[in-house]
Amino acid sequence: MTKTLKDKISDKLVNAFLNNKIISPIPSRFTKRLAEADKFRKLCESKIKDPTIGFKAGGTGIPLMKKLKEKEPFIASVFKKNLIKSGKIVKINKFALGIELEVCYLIKKTFFTSKGKLTNSNVTKYISHMAPCIEVVGYRQKRKGITSFGDLSSDFGGNIKFLIGQKKKFKKINIGNLKTNISNKKAKQSVDGNTNAVYVNPINSLRFVLNKVKKDKINLDKDFYVFTGSTVGVVPIIKKGTYTAKIDKLGSVRAVIS
């Protein structure tokens, strides 16, 4: 059976994902519109045998959404190979976009048997734990910058690695207004943020992701993570070394960029 161009390109991107390689840019027909990019992402994800450990929200900054004329964020699966412990080394290439600081939630598997749409009020009953996390974002293609959310969505959501800080049992706090900071002392770089930069707030972003997972009829039959989006935007990696990130009331997390 002859493979389509879409299949051939997805094979190349999957190989790049699995073997940390860089390929030529994906044709814009697969990335320009988010709907097409999501179809391409799902095709690529279906070819990965590594266990899915959760899902990420991307494009959660409302100013960027308006600038790119996007209507909503996007989601992507997160695989086991892309999740490492706080303080571990992350090797990047020159097509890395930067580093982000996020709130992540551990969701109970009972979510998969829930009925109806989730709201900001009822979604919290499925949360087991919460934690600060760092996401290193970028491409597996010879591509720079962002022209649409499809650029990121089509390339496994633009995720390179996630690093999670110490998890805490979930409790209701003012998650929509917590100060955040990420810094690299060696580079004399420090960026402040707030959890209110995340699609109104991280709980709202969580609701969005879980409703998308429901719509796609995904069932992992196990507890899983949801990464809700950056509280500091995409912070450029201006110098390799240790990035330390903190979220008030949640704790800290570190990544060593090399």
Image (cartoon, rainbow, N blue to C red):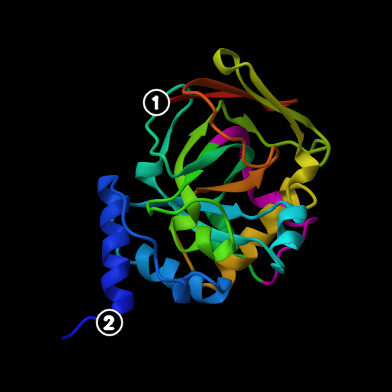
Q: Which residues are magenta?
A: 116-134
- The residue sitting at 28% across, 50% down in the picture is 18
- The residue sitting at 63% across, 37% down in the picture is 130
Task: Identify the residue under disc 2.
Answer: 4
- The residue sitting at 57% across, 71% down in the picture is 34
Any magenta on residue 119?
Answer: yes
- The residue sitting at 77% across, 44% down in the picture is 197
Three-letter code, disc 2:
Thr
Pinpoint residue 46: horizontal percent, then vertical percent. Answer: 34, 67
In the displayed structure image, the side of residue 97 where residue 193 appears, left or right: right
Task: Identify the residue under disc 1.
Answer: 258
In the displayed structure image, the side of residue 220 where residue 61 appears, left or right: right
Name the outermost residue toward the left. Answer: 1
The answer to which of marks 2 and 1 sits earlier in the sequence is: 2
* Distance from Cα at disc 2 to Cα at disc 1: 37 Å
Evaluate if marks 2 and 1 touch, with contact meaning CB atoms under 8 Å apart. no
Q: Is residue 48 visible?
A: no
Q: Nearer the viewer, residue 216 or 60?
A: 60
Q: Residues within 10 Å of mark 2 (few under 14, many from 20)?
A: few
Q: Which mark is residue 65?
A: none
Name the outermost residue toward the top. Answer: 186
Q: Is residue 144 visible?
A: yes
Pinpoint residue 85: horizontal percent, then vertical percent. Answer: 44, 28
